[in-house]
Amino acid sequence: MKKSVLTRYRVMAYVTGVLLVLLTLGVIAKYLLEMDGAADFTRVVGIAHGWLYVLYLVFAFDVGAKAKWPVGKQVWVLLAGTIPTAAFFVERKVSHELEGKIVDDPAAVAKA
């Protein structure tokens, strides 16, 4: 597996995780604290998270397909972007697991 595949997944996991935490805080501010401006913040962050989560799904599926994960593991990684802070923990576990499978030589990847 190429390093760029894992890097794309890691970036999107962090982006999705941060946006989901911000969205959760925005929802708390909007409904529990009834803060002014929280509705606009929640709308913007919610839209951003929704679109970027789709990219996260694509990159996570790509990593899982190349790593030949079983379906259950793949589903768990895909759902990690919907549970606040789960994306951070799952990304760390996936990165540690796949670091040994990364090939830096593009010619070696082409032959595999």
Image (cartoon, helix red, strand yellow):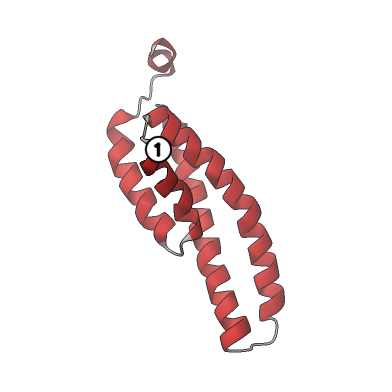
Q: What percent of the width, then of the height, locates residue 20?
A: 53, 63
Q: Up-down: is 105 above or below 31? A: above
Question: In which quadrant of the rendered view does residue 86 lie?
Answer: bottom left
Q: SS for tag 1?
A: helix
Hey, what amino acid is under mark 1?
Val
Provide residue 4's location: percent of width, then percent of height.
47, 33
Q: Is residue 28 above or below residue 93?
A: below
- Circle count: 1
Quadrant for the N terminus in the image: top left
Q: Quadrant of the C terminus?
A: top left
Q: Which residue is mark 1?
A: 71
Q: Position of residue 27 (x, y in %)?
A: 59, 76
Q: Nearer the viewer, residue 3 or 52?
A: 52
Name the residue: 69% across, 69% down. 43
Q: Residue at x 36, y 35 (%)?
A: 70
99, above or below 14, in the image = above
* Residue 23 on image: x %, y %: 57, 69
Q: Residue at horizontal 43%, vertical 45%?
A: 75
